[in-house]
């Protein structure tokens, strides 16, 4: 094999690997959305950091958040439903607009303690479209019976 042939095969292998990775990400996203209860949203720890795009899947006990551009099958973050409260709500500020759009709503989320006390500060910020936010708030308020704090 000549140097040119090796370069051509190397380029072909790299192109095939890139296409396989893109296809795998697309199949993973399709599988997450197909099961239902998924919404596109952005997540970051409260206090800063970059917004990460992902899919939130509603479960009976938690919101499981998966990164969009990942092949990892497990959620990158799990927000337990028990004790989860909306601490604040706002529109994106100028710093947020570099990563998310102005038609989204940002909610700060925290957890109450076993005594029912309000959280000291939020743990996460979640950004999503207004229609998706309505669905999230409905999910949060409609916790099944018997899942409240019990001491």
Image: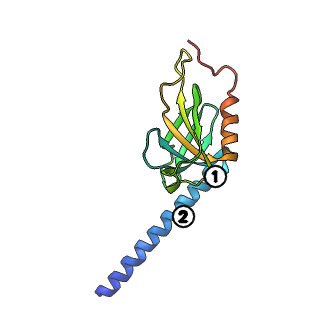
Q: Is residue 59 left or right of residue 71?
A: right
Q: In the drawing, does residue 33 fall left or right of residue 97? A: right
Instruction: Give x and y (percent) for residue 37.
Output: 67, 43
| Residue 79 visible to the viewer | yes
Q: Earlier in the sequence, mark 1 or mark 2?
A: 2
Q: Which mark is residue 23?
A: 2
Task: In this rendered view, identify the residue nearer to me: 106 or 41.
Answer: 106
What residue sits 50% from the left and 32% below the top? Answer: 122
18 up-or-down from 141: above or below: below
Q: Residue furthest front?
A: 94
Residue 92 % position (x, y): 56, 48
Quarter containing the N terminus? bottom left
76 lies above or below 98: above
Where on the picture, by quarter, is residue 132? Answer: top right
In-image side of 151 versus 6 (left or right): right
The label on residue 103 is: 1
Compare residues 1 and 99 and report the one nearer the observer.
Answer: 99
Tell me the SS state at disc 1. Answer: loop
Please tell me which residue is depicted at 57% across the width and 25% down the height of the picture. 83
Query: How many angstroms separate mark 1 from mark 2 (CA)?
Result: 30 Å
Answer whether residue 1 is visible to the viewer in this image.
no
């Amino acid at each position: 094999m000549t140097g040119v042939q090796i370069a051509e095969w190397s380029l072909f292998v790299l192109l095939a690997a890139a296409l396989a990775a893109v296809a795998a990400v697309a199949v993973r996203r399709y599988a997450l959305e197909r099961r239902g209860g998924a919404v596109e949203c952005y997540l970051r720890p409260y206090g800063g950091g970059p917004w990460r795009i992902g899919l939130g899947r509603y479960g009976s006990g938690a919101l499981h958040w998966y990164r969009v551009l990942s092949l990892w099958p497990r959620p990158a973050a799990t927000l337990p439903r028990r004790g989860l409260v909306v601490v604040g709500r706002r529109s994106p500020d100028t710093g947020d607009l570099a990563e998310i759009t102005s038609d989204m709503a940002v909610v700060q989320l925290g957890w109450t303690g076993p005594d029912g006390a309000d959280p000291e500060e939020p743990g996460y910020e979640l950004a999503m479209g207004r229609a998706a936010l309505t669905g999230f708030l409905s999910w949060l308020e409609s916790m099944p019976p018997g899942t409240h704090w019990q001491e």
